[in-house]
Amino acid sequence: MDIKPFFAPEYYITDEFTIRSYMLGDGPLLAEAVNASYEHLKRFMPWAKPHTEDIEAENTIRRWRGEYLLATNFTLGVFDPDGKRLLGSSGFHLREGDLNNRAAEIGMWIRADAAHKGLGSRVLRAILTWGFTAWPWERLTWRCNEENIASRRTAEKAGMRLEGRFRAVTRLPDGTRETMLAFAILKDEWEMGNR
């Protein structure tokens, strides 16, 4: 069954954070978070660079917002409760087919000063809850570099299953190749674990 038109939910609120679509004007918050976290991000996030200008980040936000409204990709910001600080970024990315496939890949990064405190695990559990209740997803996946132990543990803590190891699958900017781990959880598995 075709699920178009699809109007994506806009936000998911907890006491600790809000997960929401990026909105126009969020560019400076994104620039601040990635600039403050470059050293933390650069190892496993090939897109990270030493400095991002506010206008560049705002242009990125506008592209993401357009994709969100067109239901072609769903990039999400993780904001503190008052919305004045970006704690990280996530999303439901349509890398396994279009929306009618009802499957998405979750990506995530957490800013440096909020990392290694369990926030990523709490955000992922919230995203899974939101994804399997308010969205049409039947399968959600997570990929990470084999050497990114924190990312692997985040997926495992959320109940995602390791489905595969892809050797030297991606060529990085420095010329090395990374091995990726693929995790997934199905809606019925999530429901069984959250009764």
Image (tube, rainbow, N blue to C red):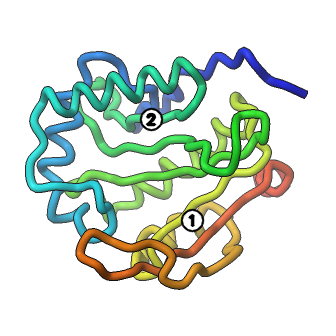
| Element type at mark 1 | helix
| Element type at mark 2 | strand
> Residue 21 at x, y = what percent?
45, 26
- Front-lying residue, 100 or 115: 100
Residue under numbered circle 2: 76
The label on residue 94 is none
> Residue 46 at x, y = what percent?
30, 62
Q: Give me the C-alpha separation between circle 1 and circle 2.
A: 18 Å
Q: Quadrant of residue 109?
A: bottom left
- Front-lying residue, 145 or 122: 145
Q: Inspect the image, locate mark 1, and give the three-letter code of the amino acid beneath it.
A: Ala
Task: Judge whether 51 appears above or below 1 on screen.
Answer: below
**Quick check: 151 left or right of 142?**
left
> Residue 33 at x, y = what percent?
20, 43
Residue under numbered circle 1: 155
- Front-lying residue, 190 or 175: 175
Q: Inspect the image, locate mark 2, and give the three-letter code of the amino acid beneath it.
A: Leu
Q: Quadrant of residue 120?
A: bottom left
